[in-house]
């Protein structure tokens, strides 16, 4: 069973999804850093890149957004052969205005990714205004049930006002919906699209045409389902706003909505703040005594499994197998909790028996089946690694809450004081060959100055004698371990 806790403040909204008493997902939205996903803009083509079959689109952000030819809408569907798709330079031109939707938030140094294939999500349906097909979520029941729902939808779409086109995809929560509820969602989505089109005709490039729902509203629309026991929010004002929104768009969720008025902060109920701190750590402890080491890079994420203090009770193979099984469950949870995406490499402890490898993969797939974000997994490689991908649409939790360390500049390590001392000695020698000052003064951190006065004093004195100039030292507390300055007096 699932509980959803919402901690609301004017500057930040935090949502925790708790399943069976354990935090599984965290969602954070800040008022000044709200994501762009699903927003629709009037964009201007700033540059077309035939070599990349892409275009940069100005939608009014600091960085131009990216549109690939595969994400361009075409009136005629392309054939199975990719050569049937015209090159991007024949479809768009610089200065052209396009209605585009953000399908991936800006991440790191990359701008937002766009599509001109618009989709608008409702409570039960997703509207495809440029399409005419009826799609059904694969998570809905059997093939026969999906076909029955498709026939119902085709009848409802045919009964709606003439002159309207567009396709629909039934979401998972539409399985038990009545015809009246589906018809209401159809009308709401078409009304929304008509308003977007009207604004697009008048708007200048870079104008926001449609803003997606706030995080608290998306909780009711996207995250609440039949397994949800309660949605608790700690703000009376937002509770009332959410109740009104739910009554109009998600009536089945309103009964689960609760205002939390307890004295303890709502996130203290399940230790959410401590869980956030643990989700930012590099090392994750397992109950057995083993642990995971998670490292994020720009290209991929690596997760290393170690036995740690777990020695098992029977034999070494069983110890490794049990650790890997526990790690598979923990990895699936950490991917959701930290919102890790892109290429992910899993380094399980080497297993000799093939049946153990298959069991670990089966457990990993079982746990990932609960993930709403699309994942793909390959088997074990010859090196004993598991390669997988998880769709990335927004920043990970670490990138959202943290920034690279200004001291190590994101490397995760700094030079030793001795290394910095030798850098300084080489720099003084270099300067002495070009200039003729009366004295060299070294300004550095306390650790570096202390080493130059103690363990490296003989080398410093030898250099001073060699260049024939005195070298003085001064400590500067504001300098990082790697920073120093050499002043010529």
Image: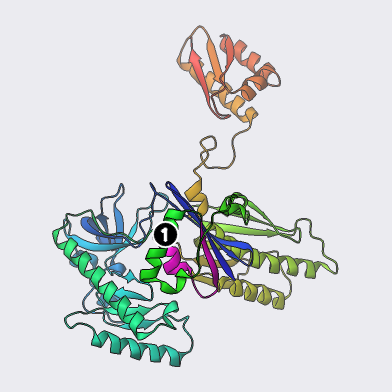
Quarter of the rendering occupied by the N terminus: bottom right
Among the 4 quarters of the image, the one containing residue 421 = top right
Q: Is residue 287 left or right of residue 132?
A: right
Q: Position of residue 304 (x, y in %)?
A: 64, 58
Q: Is residue 312 left or right of residue 412?
A: right
Report the front residue among 41 and 261: 261
Q: Position of residue 50 (x, y in %)?
A: 25, 61
Q: Residue at the location (49% across, 43% down)?
A: 403
Q: Which residue is mark 1?
A: 240
Q: Which residues are magenta?
A: 215-233
Figure label count = 1
Vertical relation: 461 (above or below) 157: above
- Whether residue 285 is visible here, answered yes or no, is yes
Look at the image and say whether residue 218 sits in the magenta stretch: yes
Q: Residue at the location (36% across, 76% down)?
A: 125
Disc 1: CA contacts within 10 A as few (<14), some (14-19) or many (>=20): some
Report the front residue among 101 and 245: 245
Furthest-right residue in this view: 314
């Amino acid at each position: 069973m699932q509980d959803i806790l919402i901690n609301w403040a004017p500057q930040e909204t935090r949502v925790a999804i708790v399943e069976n008493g354990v935090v599984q997902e965290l969602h954070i939205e800040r008022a000044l850093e709200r994501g762009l996903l699903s927003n629709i803009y009037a964009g201007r083509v700033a540059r077309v890149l035939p070599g990349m079959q892409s275009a940069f689109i100005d939608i009014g952000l600091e960085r131009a957004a990216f549109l690939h030819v595969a994400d361009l809408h075409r009136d005629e569907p392309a054939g199975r052969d990719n050569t049937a798709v015209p090159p991007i330079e024949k479809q768009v031109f610089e200065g052209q205005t396009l209605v585009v939707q953000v399908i991936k938030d800006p991440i790191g140094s990359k701008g937002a990714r766009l599509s001109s294939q618009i989709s608008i999500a409702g409570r039960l349906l997703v509207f495809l205004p440029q399409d005419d097909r009826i799609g059904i979520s694969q998570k809905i029941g059997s093939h026969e049930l999906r076909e029955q729902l498709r026939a119902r939808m085709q009848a409802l779409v045919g009964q709606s006002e003439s002159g309207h086109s567009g396709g629909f995809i039934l979401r998972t929560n539409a399985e038990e919906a009545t015809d009246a509820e589906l018809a209401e969602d159809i009308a709401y989505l078409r009304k929304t699209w008509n308003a977007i089109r009207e604004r697009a005709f008048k708007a200048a490039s870079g104008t926001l045409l449609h803003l997606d729902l706030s995080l608290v509203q998306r909780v009711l629309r996207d995250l609440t389902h039949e397994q949800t026991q309660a949605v608790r929010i700690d703000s009376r004002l937002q509770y009332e706003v959410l109740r009104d929104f739910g009554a109009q768009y998600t009536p089945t969720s309103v009964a689960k909505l609760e205002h939390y008025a307890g004295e303890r902060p709502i996130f203290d109920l399940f230790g959410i703040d401590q869980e956030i701190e643990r989700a930012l750590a590099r090392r994750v402890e397992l109950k057995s005594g083993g642990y995971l080491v998670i490292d994020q890079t720009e290209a991929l994420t690596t997760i290393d499994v170690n036995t740690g203090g777990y020695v098992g009770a029977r034999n070494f193979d069983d110890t490794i197998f049990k650790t890997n099984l526990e790690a598979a469950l923990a990895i699936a949870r950490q991917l959701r909790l930290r919102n890790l995406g892109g290429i992910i490499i899993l380094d399980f402890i080497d297993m000799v028996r093939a049946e153990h490898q298959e069991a670990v993969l089966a457990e990993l797939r079982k746990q990932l089946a609960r993930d709403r974000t699309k994942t793909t997994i390959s088997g074990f490689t010859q090196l004993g690694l598991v390669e997988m991908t998880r769709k990335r649409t927004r920043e990970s939790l670490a990138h959202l809450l943290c920034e690279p360390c200004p001291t190590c500049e994101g490397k995760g390590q700094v030079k030793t004081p001795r290394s910095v001392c030798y850098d300084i000695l080489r720099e003084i020698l270099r300067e002495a060959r070009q200039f003729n000052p009366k004295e060299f003064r070294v300004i550095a951190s306390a650790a570096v100055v202390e080493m130059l006065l103690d363990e490296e004093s003989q080398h410093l004195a030898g250099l001073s004698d060699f260049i024939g100039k005195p070298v003085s030292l001064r400590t500067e507390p504001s300098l990082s371990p790697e920073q120093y300055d050499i002043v010529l007096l």
